Image: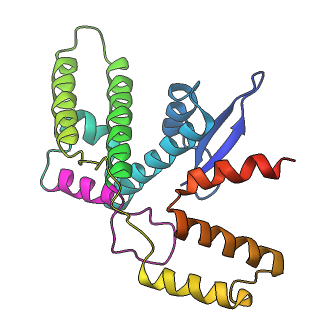
Amino acid sequence: MKLRKVRMGGINEVGCLVVDDNGVPIDRICRYTLIDLSGQADTTQANITRHVIHIERWAQKHGVDLEDEVVLGGLSKGELFTSFVRHLERFSDQSSVVSIGTVEPEYFNQRIDASIAYFDYLVSRANARRHTGDPMIIQIIKLAEKLKERLQKRRRHVAKNSQVYGLSLLLQASLYQGLSDPKYFGWNRNTALRNKLICRICYETGVRRGELLLRILPQSEH
């Protein structure tokens, strides 16, 4: 599955298609990305679509009919729910390089939210095909609410304060090397002088990067 951006006819808006390995749009997914996500910022649509692709890849990998499983099972069979959450933790498997790390909490929470919204879409889609008064509709809604609660409980705490306190020892050593030997980074004479001044100002005054930028921009505009 791959993401393809398309220009929507008649309006100045970009939509997101999800196509298979042959380049053919996947109808069930595209109805969601083109209709339900319509009106949101282009970058937001693209990010959510990437999350949906990640979700669908889990189903594809495990041979699961995602709509049937969400609607009729609520991911409650065996270890399916745990497997799904573990999949959300992992980086997208788009290369031959296997990553043993996990995504940051904030990005993981985005995937949780995207899963909840996408599953709501699948439930609404399934119920729309049923006759009014079908007793299964109530059961499906109950399963969907239970699944939503389970997913929400997996959201992770996001620290408000940054845990980054400075450059690592390796980055510091690389910076020192570059300042003493500009060719190390491929800097020309003017770039090297500018960067030395920036580092000197930061070191001597403790100015933040944003504050430094505000001081530099007005001068560069003249």
Residue at the far left in the pictured view = 78
Residue 27 falls inside the magenta stretch: no
Q: How is the image coloured?
A: rainbow
Q: Please tell me which residue is depicted at 65% across the width and 85% down the height of the picture.
A: 178
Can the viewer see residue 22 in this picture? Answer: yes
**Residue 78 placement: quadrant:** bottom left
**Residue 6 placement: quadrant:** top right
Query: Is most of the magenta stretch helix, strand or loop?
Result: loop
Q: Nearer the viewer, residue 133 or 154?
A: 154
Q: Position of residue 38 (x, y in %)?
A: 57, 26
Q: From the viewer's perspective, is 97 left or right of 101?
A: right
Residue at the far front in the pictured view = 204
Vertical order, 177 against 167 (above or below): below
- Number of numbered discs present? 0
Vertical order, 135 against 56 (above or below): above
Q: Please tell me which residue is depicted at 43% across the width and 53% down the height of the picture.
A: 54
Residue at the far top in the pictured view = 133
Can the viewer see residue 63 in this picture? Answer: no
Residue 90 falls inside the magenta stretch: yes
Q: Position of residue 163 (x, y in %)?
A: 33, 61
Q: From the viewer's perspective, is 118 left or right of 220?
A: left
Vertical order, 90 against 33 (above or below): below
Q: Position of residue 13 (x, y in %)?
A: 70, 29
Q: Which residues are magenta?
A: 79-104
Q: Please tell me which residue is depicted at 38% across the width and 29% down the height of the picture.
A: 121
Q: Position of residue 106 (x, y in %)?
A: 35, 49
